[in-house]
Image (cartoon, rainbow, N blue to C red):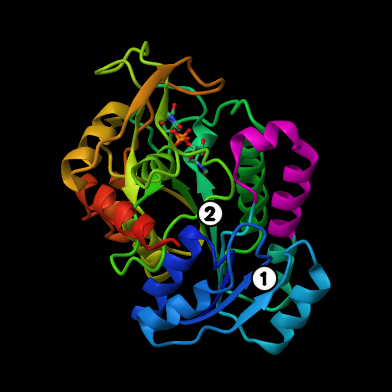
């Protein structure tokens, strides 16, 4: 199939482009480069030997997208483009609502106008809010405490309501847990701008001496060692989940969790990183971060049964590949 990947020069988008190309799909990438770099296109070529057509387009610009859809005959859209920093979303809610909602509405309108059959949406476990894990797709959606999470819930609702009148469309909402790791080549990975919000890129910047130490946000949670527990999933397994959804999902609107089903604490991840990479990670326990939840991990049985998808890469692979990528960043 010919697939448009929005946000395709980003962390998850670029890894997904590689997996689609390996599976024989034709890929076109649009990205506004607000949180990624165009040289990712060359890195995808190095890995796959395919030069993916790239267009610098802001998905809020309907007319530019329309022109591209007129020129290309897309079979599907995988929509990653969106702002995703929880903290920033509380400071700039209007920027998040406008960007994340308008881009999704534009793409759904173009899906309708140009009779595109597949739409895969990048959602997040954040839509579950604070409730007991394991989280299944039947778990109720809760108040997410931040505009970023609310935009994901609203986009899911928009696509679900659209699908109700279009039974010929295949619309898949993928709820990611905590993606970490990098392509084994060391060419693709997460490059946060400024201070990393997320745990793994902060750890790799401490390992590369860009930062003195890791600050662990609280060790008084009701967990195995008091630190936060999350379901870390290798970004390549996550990318393969998108391929499985594209190839196997049924018509209508369906929802899948993409996680490993295993919860790992901050300290467990730090110790695994230290053991596998033989690098010390100095850290200091500090106060909890506002909005953090003690424990979040998935039940991913539904994706396993219906999409024949399961994760295969271990937390050891995740910490090894994350470090391998960090070493390659100049
Ligand atoms: C993981 C654990 C922190 C940084 C967020 C978004 C979610 C998704 C993934 C977009 C927690 C602890 C972190 C640090 C720390 N993003 N931590 N020191 O918060 O689970 O999820 O990113 O879709 O929507 O909410 O990920 O990596 O920020 O935190 O101690 O410097 O690491 O308290 O327990 P999180 P995270």
Count of number-bearing discs: 2
Vertically, is 168 above or below 224?
below
Q: Residue 251: x, y in percent?
A: 49, 64
- At 83% from the left and 74% from the top, the residue drawn is 63
What SS does tag 2 mark? strand
Which percent across, then down, holds residue 119?
56, 65
The answer to which of marks 1 and 2 sits earlier in the sequence is 1
Pick the front one: 49 or 271: 271
Residue 168 spot, x, y in % from top left: 57, 69
Of labels 1 and 2, the one closer to you: 2
The residue at the point 37 percent across, 47 percent down is 208
In this view, 279 is above or below 164: above
The response on whether ligand 1 sits within 8 Å of label 2 is yes
| Corner quadrant of residue 295 | top left
In the picture, measured across the screen, residue 234 lies left or right of residue 106, that is: left
Magenta part of the chain: 83-105
95 magenta-colored: yes
Specify whether residue 297 is painted magenta.
no
Left or right, 296 with reference to 128 = left
Q: Which residue is mark 2?
A: 122
| Residue at image mark 1 | 111
The quadrant of the picture occupied by the C terminus is bottom left
Front in this rendered view, residue 183 or 129: 183
Q: Residue at x 37, y 45 (%)?
A: 204
């Amino acid at each position: 199939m010919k697939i448009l990947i929005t946000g395709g020069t980003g962390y998850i988008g670029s890894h997904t482009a590689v997996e689609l190309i390996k599976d024989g799909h034709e890929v076109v990438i649009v990205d506004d480069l607000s949180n990624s770099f165009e040289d990712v296109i060359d890195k995808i070529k190095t890995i796959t030997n395919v030069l993916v057509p790239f267009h610098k387009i802001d998905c809020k610009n309907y007319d530019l997208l329309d022109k591209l859809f007129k020129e290309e005959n897309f079979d599907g859209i995988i929509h990653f483009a969106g702002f995703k920093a929880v903290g920033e979303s509380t400071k700039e809610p209007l920027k998040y609502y406008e960007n994340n909602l308008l881009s999704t509405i534009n793409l759904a309108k173009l899906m309708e106008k140009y009779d595109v059959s597949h739409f895969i949406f990048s959602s997040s476990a954040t839509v579950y809010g604070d409730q007991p894990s394991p989280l299944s797709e039947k778990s109720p959606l809760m108040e997410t405490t931040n505009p970023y999470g609310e935009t994901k819930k609203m986009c899911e609702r928009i696509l679900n309501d659209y699908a109700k009148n279009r039974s010929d469309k295949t619309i898949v909402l993928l709820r990611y847990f905590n993606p970490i790791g990098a392509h084994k080549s060391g060419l693709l990975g997460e490059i946060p701008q400024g201070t990393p919000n997320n745990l793994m890129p902060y750890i790799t910047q401490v390992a590369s001496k860009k930062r003195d130490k890791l600050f662990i946000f609280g060790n008084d949670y009701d967990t195995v060692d008091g630190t936060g527990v999350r379901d870390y999933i290798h970004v390549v397994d996550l990318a393969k989940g998108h391929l499985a959804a594209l190839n196997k999902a049924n018509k209508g609107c369906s929802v899948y969790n993409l996680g490993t089903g295993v919860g790992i604490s901050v300290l467990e991840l730090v110790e695994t990183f230290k053991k596998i990479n033989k690098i010390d990670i100095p850290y200091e326990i500090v106060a909890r971060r506002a909005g953090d939840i003690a424990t979040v991990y998935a039940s991913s049985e539904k994706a396993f049964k219906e999409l024949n998808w399961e994760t295969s890469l271990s937390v050891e692979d995740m910490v090894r590949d994350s470090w391998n990528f960090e070493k390659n960043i100049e």
